Image (tube, rainbow, N blue to C red):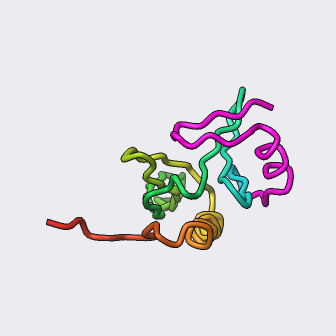
Amino acid sequence: MRFKTNTTIAIPEEQLQADYAAAQKQEKLKLGEKCLYIAHTLYTEYMPYEAIERAYRRVEDVRGKLCCGVITYEIHHLVMVIDGKEVTVLLESKDAAQKALEQIADKNPKAPIGYHEKEK
């Protein structure tokens, strides 16, 4: 398996393999002890918890027209700020995003979780 990261923190391949094998699956994510993993077609992207500067859940309402009316769907995104850039993962359920946020808060207590107003 190929591992890639967009952070400056490099972790040895052997440690990544072991952490990935023991990681808990949450839809498109795997939550390990050292990193959060996102599976792509040709590689797996890893994000060390200490590289995450801030994380929150973004909810998007999407209106869908059906034959008998209109329905609104909620789409959940896990958004993480790493090296000043937003990394967004589309998730199917609120629970998966919430569990990922709890894991990030547990592994990196100094990273703000949730909505925070910008300082002026």
In the rendered view, tell whether residue 42 sits above or below residue 31: above
Q: Is residue 55 left or right of residue 16?
A: left
In the rendered view, tell whether residue 93 sits above or below residue 106: above
The image quadrant of residue 14 is top right
Name the residue furthest top.
42
Magenta stretch holds residue 20:
yes
Q: Is residue 92 left or right of residue 66?
A: right
Spot occupied by residue 104 in the image (x, y as percentages of width and height): 58, 65
Residue located 55% across and 67% down the image: 108
Give the camera-side residue of 40 and 93: 40
In the rendered view, tell whether residue 83 sits above or below residue 74: above
Instruction: Please identify the quadrant where the N terminus is shown.
Output: top right
Spot occupied by residue 29 in the image (x, y as percentages of width and height): 68, 52
Residue located 46% across and 66% down the image: 111
- In magenta, the rendered stretch is 1-25
Q: How many marks?
A: 0
Give the camera-side residue of 27 and 102: 102
Name the residue furthest left.
120
The image quadrant of residue 98 is bottom right
Spot occupied by residue 86 in the image (x, y as percentages of width and height): 41, 47
The image quadrant of residue 85 is top left
Residue located 59% across and 64% down the image: 97
Spot occupied by residue 90 in the image (x, y as percentages of width and height): 56, 50
Give the camera-side residue of 84 and 27: 84
Instruction: Please identify the quadrant where the C terminus is shown.
Output: bottom left
Magenta stretch holds residue 82:
no
In the rendered view, tell whether residue 54 sits above or below residue 44: below
Residue located 32% across and 70% down the image: 116
